[in-house]
Amino acid sequence: MVPRYSRPQMTALWEPEAKYRIWFEIEAHATEKLGELGVVPPSAAKALWDWWATNPTIDVDAIDAIEAVTKHDVIAFLTWVAEQVGDEARFMHQGMTSSDVLDTTLSVQLARATDILIDDMDGLLAAIKTRAMEHKYTPTIGRSHGIHAEPVTFGLKLAQAYAEFSRCRDRLIAARAEIATCAISGAVGTFANVDPAVEAHVADKLGLAIEPVSTQVIPRDRHAMYFATLAVVAGSIERLAVEIRHLQRTEVLEAEEYFSPGQKGSSAMPHKRNPILTENLTGQARMIRAYALPALENVALWHERDISHSSVERFIGPDATITLDFALARLTGVIEKLLIYPERMQKNLDAMGGLVHSQRVLLALTQAGVSREDAYSLVQRNAMKVWESSGALSLLDLLKADPQVIAALSPAELEEKFDLAYHFRHVDTIFARVFG
């Protein structure tokens, strides 16, 4: 976790004290059910909860000191709690194994982290929708291979992003359901020393589903799916960030990040206004995607379990969720404050002498009886003259002067094919599909 790229709410989920609080809840809820089943005295759970109600602070340093001797974090925690609660604490952890606590806690942390990420996504979607509506009919050039293609609107570019992040939101919801499972099944997962009813009780109290077969650990295919989902979301963040970076290039300059008063772009060149936020988002996306690979490699454990996954998850659990939380919030801010330049968009649209309308002329020629091959050749030979003049020549003027073209289409018919509004006839339909 890097403080520079962290936000307090998400970071708090991964603090040691927050983790120990979840550990205590798991142990106390399990002891509570064991008391109902008659396995331990009901007074044991009461003693735990009574202590908890009057002692809100967990001494992380004291637990760490015990672990320095025991070399086992769960035993260190249980030892410390027993020192605080007294004799009744001996009934904690009856029939359980460390993974019951560790894996269930990780499920709680990831589920709660996902709730924050979904809230982040809602904020981003709202920002994109606002700007998309604002520029629903703002003409701009569509590009393929980085080359001018045909006209679109800036609102449509943002509508695409909205649709993509809506899918990302659905994926986060599915990932939360996948990861939010509880395992309190004992050594090798057979429930030999702990009744399945204990697992059901803890799951209910923590808002988790029951893990059908835990083999002592929750199967890591769930975690692989979860972190792969975060990687996909990161990919979508980078896609939009890269688009903004391209739009901010000096030669394009159709949109750019907000440049605040007093901000500096370069230590050497005072004129610079660099897309640092979206470049930063590209870097963060790379890191989030990188966490997916070790999660996939964690799936294959030895026999019922080993702990090769454990050290990995101590890194990727906090880092992936904290970084994605920060990235979503940063992208939301970029979109909200994005400087958009319709005049420059129009200038770029007009820069290549009307080449963006070539397909309409091609289609009109074929509808006028010219073969597609001949029509393509007629339009291309004129278009290449415009291309080679860097837009100084006009495609419409050249077509009007081409006898073979005029033989099929009148000047008035050709002019009609250069109507920009034609390309935006179905914007409402697309917006209705995206925004409802």
Image (spheres, helix red, strand yellow):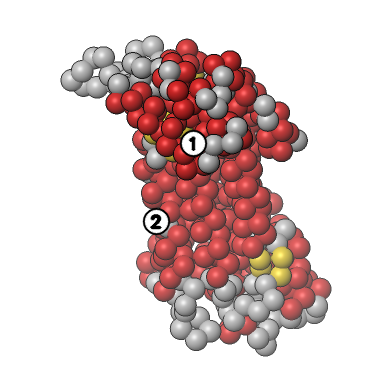
Numbered disc 1: secondary structure = helix
Against 322, is 35 above or below? below
Q: Is residue 305 above or below residue 49?
A: below
- Where residue 285 appears, x then y in whole percent? 42, 46
Question: Mark 2: which secondary structure?
Answer: helix
Q: Nearer the viewer, residue 410 or 108?
A: 410
Give the label, 2 or 1, closer to the camera: 1
Q: Residue sitting at 58 percent across and 55 percent down?
A: 109
Q: Residue at x 62, y 82 (%)?
A: 189
Front-lying residue, 385 or 178:
385
Which residue is label 2 attached to? 290
- Image coordinates for residue 235, horizontal then vertical, percent: 47, 47
Label at residue 375: 1
Residue 254 % position (x, y): 43, 21
Residue 199 visible from this viewpoint: yes
Q: State whether residue 25 is above or below residue 362.
A: below
Q: Is residue 376 left or right of residue 109?
A: left
Looking at the rendered structure, the kind of residue marked 2 is: Ala
| Label 1 neighbour load within 10 Å: few <14, some 14-19, many 20+ | many
Q: Name the N-terminal-most of marks 2 and 1.
A: 2
